[in-house]
Amino acid sequence: MPAFKLTIAYDGTGLVGWQRQSEGTSVQGLLEDALARLLDLPSVGVTGAGRTDAGVHARGQVASVVLDTARPPAYLQRGMNALLPPAVRVLTCEPAEPGFHARFGAKEKRYAYHLVVGPLISPFDVRYAWHIPYALDVAAMRAALPMLEGRHDFAAFQSSGSDIEGTVRTVTEARLADEPVEGGNIRLVLTLAGDGFLRHMVRAIAGSLVEIGRGRWPPDHLTAILAAADRGQAGPTAPPQGLFLVSVRYC
């Protein structure tokens, strides 16, 4: 049976995340139900590159699916988008090599975490950024980022409840961009790319950087957090609405 690679964007507001659950609306469930209905199949299994949590968004989530159909990719894309809610869009649908697996075949994932720093946040940003109402030392936050790059044990940035055994990951890029926005605010965008990410890892790193930015810790304290391998030593888990899965690379 032919395999397909899907690239999907979604607004995670009001969704329980990527993974189908017993209650609530998930991205995986919406896609599987749409394909089953479109092709009149009893069930369909769609595998995502990453299991984004409730409230987390994606600009370039990737999924793989094997379908018993001769329909072309363009038909599948149009049909899915016609059946999906506006908050979920299939950006591309293309043939995949036999054995393509969206999760296990991924070489690099890229995430972006958005923060708006200032006294007020626009109603058009509140669903897509963490509002920080006090000033942050952005230079100190940037000074900490090189300590994240490379291969490290990121156990200190993993939330409980994960079934993943190993906690060593390689971060290939860590950067922090800033730009002015309306009302005199500043938008900060933390970008992290790597070969894999633990549960809540990006959000825990964002929370730790904010602690550095507010002066609680010096930048080099990130090294001590990594060495401790203890979640209790790192900063809080940043809220989900600021997080975007930007892209997944396979070669």
Image: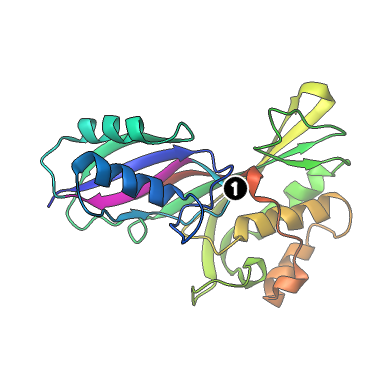
**Quarter of the figure with residue 185:** top right
**Which residue is at 61% across, 60% downward?**
200
State the image coordinates of residue 88 (x, y, percent, origin top left). Answer: 44, 37
Q: Is residue 224 visible?
A: no
Q: Is residue 65 magenta-colored?
A: yes
CA neighbours of label 1 inside 10 A, class few (<14), some (14 to 19), many (20+): many
* Residue designated by label 1: 55
The magenta segment: 59-67
- How many circles with numbers are drawn on the protein? 1
Q: Does dot 1 land on a helix, a strand or a loop?
A: loop
Q: Magenta stretch: residue 165 in it?
A: no
Against 53, is 115 above or below?
above
Q: 8 or 30: which is nearer to us?
A: 30
Can see residue 39?
yes
Magenta span: chief secondary structure: strand
The quadrant in which residue 223 appears is bottom right
Residue in the foreground of this view, choosing between 170 and 7? 7
Relative horizontal placement of residue 129, taking residue 22 as reference (left or right)? right
User: Looking at the image, is 244 positioned above or below residue 145?
Assistant: above
Relative side of 147 to 111, left or right: right
- Amino acid type indicated by mark 1: Gly
